[in-house]
Amino acid sequence: METYLSSKCFEEMGETMGKKVLIATVYNPDPVLLAATKLGPDRLILLLDEKPDREQDKALKLIQDSLGKVIEVKTVKCAVYDVVKVASKCVEIIDMQPKEDVVYVNITSGRKTKAIGLLFAAYARHDRVKKIAYNPEEDKGLVVYLPRLSFKLTESQKKILEYVDAGNYASIKELSEKIDLSTAMLYRAIDELKDMDLISVEDGLKLTDAGKIARL
């Protein structure tokens, strides 16, 4: 069958379609190697501890030796136990990828807190992440795809989180004097945000960790 597309056209189509990007936590190299083998990414971004230990360094070297000549392998250091900081760094990584690229996430290896941070980042950038994968330790050949959830917030809820994040409000009444929302709408939205565990009102208005991540 003849084609009327030149090789240049195919190259242009490839650029338009974008590249596969895999963002993964890492400590044991096996889940990363499995994910890369199954997905065939063009770019692999590994989340390292701020101070990688010998095991993580060894895992990184093995991955680079195995995949480095075939795909682009990058590393990013981030916090280990601060889920909000991990999520923030991961959102930054996702946002840096070209819009035409397709982002995949694997949360199998590495510290649990780091995996949770990457998972929350995938929720915060629901529209950019195509799949979230996990490989069970009991069956290393199995890939479990997790639901792609998102923080579905109304414009009023987003505005409240923005104000609370930027200001220091001792009470809802104090916030009501600054924000452009009716009192009824404000109280209703704050009740909803409390139910979602995005905001706390016990000691003044404050964002919870989940609220900080929802703001990313």
Image (spheres, rainbow, N blue to C red):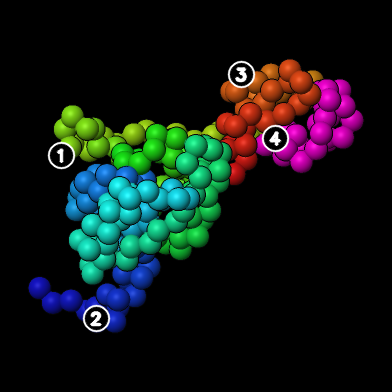
Please name whichever residue, 139 or 29, is drawn nearer the observer in this view of the structure: 29
Q: How far apart are marks 1 and 2 (CA)?
A: 37 Å
Q: Position of residue 195 (x, y in %)?
A: 61, 18
Q: Distance between the residues labelled 4 and 1?
A: 42 Å
Residue at image x 22%, y 32%? 137
Q: Distance between the residues labelled 2 and 3?
A: 55 Å
**Residue for badge 2:** 7
Q: Quadrant of residue 60?
A: bottom left
> If you read the primary sequence from the N terminus, does the residue marked by circle 4 or circle 2 appear first?
2
Residue 150 visible in this rendered orientation of the protein: yes
**Residue for badge 4:** 161
| Label 1: which secondary element | loop
Which quadrant of the rendered structure holds the N terminus?
bottom left
Which quadrant of the rendered structure holds the C terminus?
top right
Q: Answer above or below: position of 122 versus 64.
A: above
Q: Where is residue 40 in the image (x, y as percent from the top left)?
A: 23, 57
**Residue for badge 3:** 195
The label on residue 141 is 1
Residue at image x 81%, y 34%? 168
